[in-house]
Image: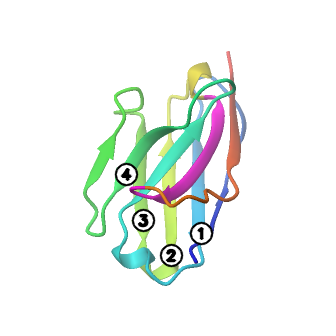
Amino acid sequence: QEQFVASGGGLVQAGGSLRLSCSTSGSTFIINPMAWYRQAPGKQRELVASIDSIGRTNYADSVKGRFTISRVNAKNTLYLQMNSLKPEDTAVYYCNTLPSLPTFGQGTQVTVSS
């Protein structure tokens, strides 16, 4: 069973940057489309960015041009480089496959102060 552990979150001022990482324990990472999701307080979880097995990417309009998703298949690791952060990016960030598996695992808190 796949397990996902996200890390790299923290508190940053608006305009700052963070790099999130996600490690997976499953053996199918290399063939799975992967994605970053986020959930802000009182809101539903939303898809932020995705990347397929050969590196093609898609982004939510709200993060396009600011966030970059990448993966290193040899390390079973997914990344999210977040630049020009805004207070509305504040959320718990999770990684999962696309479409997502039922269990999201450990997320990482990102807080952007104004």
* Image mark for residue 71: 3
Picture coordinates of residue 80, whole percent (x, y): 50, 50
Question: What amino acid is at disc 2?
Answer: Asn
Q: How was the colour assigned to the protein in this rendering?
A: rainbow
Between the residue at mark 3 and the residue at mark 2, the CA separation in whole angstroms equals 8 Å
Helix, strand or loop status at disc 2: loop
Q: Earlier in the sequence, mark 2 or mark 1?
A: 1
Among all residues in the image, which is located at the extreme top? 114
Q: Give the labeled residue for mark 1.
A: 23
Q: Is residue 94 magenta?
A: yes
Viewer-nearest of labels 4 and 3? 4
Residue that carries the numbered disc 2 in the rendered image: 76
Residue drawn 46% across and 56% down?
100
Q: Which element is circle 4 on?
A: strand
State the separation of the CA atoms marked 3 and 1.
10 Å
- Image-based side of 74 in relation to 40, left or right: left
Q: Which residue is mark 4?
A: 50
Dots 3, 1 in contact, CB < 8 A: no
Number of numbered callouts drawn: 4
The answer to whether residue 9 is visible is no
